[in-house]
């Protein structure tokens, strides 16, 4: 789709591509907060938490453009056009995204549109879901006794042009974090086990991480599908796969106010929902 801008006229406004972090309002950066407070218009995703939306000035225009799997929302082209249009009519336009805008956030695509339309921009990073989840469940992603690295992948496995590198992801010395993977838990389990990852590898599915509704579902790789199918599991949710997940048993510290505390069940229980 061609983006409409005004030839011969440059947009007076600026777009701030801002990461809102994973949910807990206190995980917003000071810079993000400062920019949000001076926003004239804010285009925000479905993943941005209400506590953060509450920080937007009352007189700023708030536009929900969130995308959620299976739910109707603004198309990416429309969002791109809206950003350009707002840059012509407003001074400080904030494009607010969950987590970090450059991690599975399509932030890059939106910036390319702004470049083409001659719109000025800045980027403010946010705490990505992997970091927020790891911290708030006591899973050090690269604890050196267990992992030499960590890989963030998308669980949208249907891209034929770029097939999943299961062999690479199955490296036992690596932690794997899967964004958007819940609906493909079976494909992910089979892909990793067929590529040689142990079926007993500890896994965690964590929903609404860093919020008062956070839930951990702990099990093993061969039970990934059952964990993902738990009716209590809410979206958004992230998977962490690797030996480091075992550390959650002792390092978990976060106690959401909503529910009482419960101790973590043994890792070898195939299906454990722990509302903490
Ligand atoms: N840009 C975002 C990711 C967007 S993709 C970031 O950096 O975090 C959306 C996926 O992120 C969701 O499907 C889920 O897998 C994950 N996610 C985002 N927020 C989350 C949260 N609070 N708890 C668990 N998973 C989350």
Image (cartoon, helix red, strand yellow):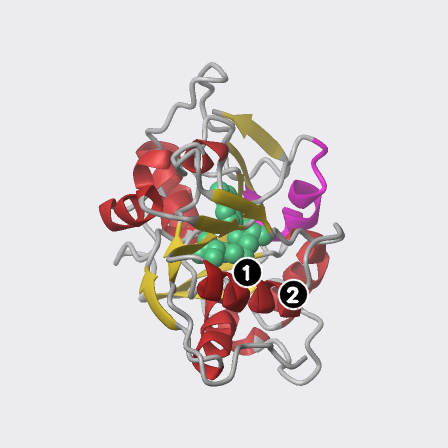
Is there a contact, CB below 8 Å, between mark 1 and mark 2? no
Point out the frontmost of discs 1 and 2.
Answer: 2
Q: Which residue is mark 2?
A: 78
Q: Is residue 89 above or below residue 249?
A: below
Instruction: Give percent across and percent down for residue 175.
Output: 42, 60
The secondary structure type at the circle numbered 2 is helix
Judged from this view, the residue extending furthest toward the front is 8
Crowding at mark 2 (Cα within 10 Å: few <14, some 14-19, many 20+):
some
Of the pair 266 and 241, the residue shown nearer to us = 241
Q: Is residue 88 above or below residue 182?
A: below
Magenta segment: 219-231
Instruction: Give percent across and percent down for residue 155.
Output: 61, 62
Q: Which residue is mark 1?
A: 198
Image quadrant where residue 179 sits = bottom right
Taking 228 as reference, is 62 left or right?
left
Chain-order first, disc 1 or disc 2: 2
Of the pair 141 and 135, the residue shown nearer to us = 135
Q: Is residue 25 magenta?
A: no
Predominant secondary structure in magenta?
helix
Of the pair 145 and 212, the residue shown nearer to us = 212
Q: How many marks?
A: 2
Image quadrant where residue 263 sits = top left
Q: Is residue 8 visible?
A: yes
The residues bearing labels 1 and 2 have C-alpha atoms spaced at a distance of 44 Å
Crowding at mark 1 (Cα within 10 Å: few <14, some 14-19, many 20+):
some
Ligand 1 lies under 8 Å from the Cβ of mark 2: no
- Per the rendering, the mark at residue 247 is none
């Amino acid at each position: 789709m061609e983006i409409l801008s005004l030839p011969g006229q440059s947009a007076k406004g600026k777009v701030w591509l801002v990461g809102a972090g994973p949910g807990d309002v206190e995980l917003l950066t000071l810079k993000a907060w400062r920019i949000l407070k001076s926003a004239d218009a804010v285009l925000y995703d479905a993943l941005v938490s209400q506590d953060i939306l509450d920080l937007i000035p009352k007189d700023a225009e708030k536009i929900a453009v969130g995308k959620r799997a299976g739910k109707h929302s603004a198309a990416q082209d429309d969002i791109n056009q809206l950003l350009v249009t707002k840059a012509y009519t407003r001074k400080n336009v904030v494009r607010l995204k969950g987590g970090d805008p450059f991690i599975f956030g399509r932030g890059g695509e939106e910036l390319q549109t702004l470049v083409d339309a001659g719109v000025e921009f800045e980027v403010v990073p946010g705490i990505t879901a992997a970091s927020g989840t790891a911290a708030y469940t006591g899973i050090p992603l690269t604890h050196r006794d267990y992992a030499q690295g960590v890989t963030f992948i998308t669980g949208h496995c249907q891209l034929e042009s770029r097939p999943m590198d299961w062999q690479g992801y199955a490296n036992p010395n690596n932690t794997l974090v899967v964004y958007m993977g819940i609906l493909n838990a079976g494909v992910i389990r089979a892909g990793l086990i067929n590529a040689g990852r142990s079926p007993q590898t500890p896994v965690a599915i964590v929903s609404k991480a860093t919020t008062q509704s956070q839930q951990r579902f702990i099990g093993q790789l061969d039970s990934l599908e059952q964990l993902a199918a738990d009716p209590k599991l809410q979206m958004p949710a992230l998977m962490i796969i690797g030996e480091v997940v075992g550390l959650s048993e002792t390092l978990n510290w976060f106690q959401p106010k909503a529910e009482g505390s419960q101790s973590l069940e043994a890792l070898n229980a195939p299906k454990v929902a722990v509302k903490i």
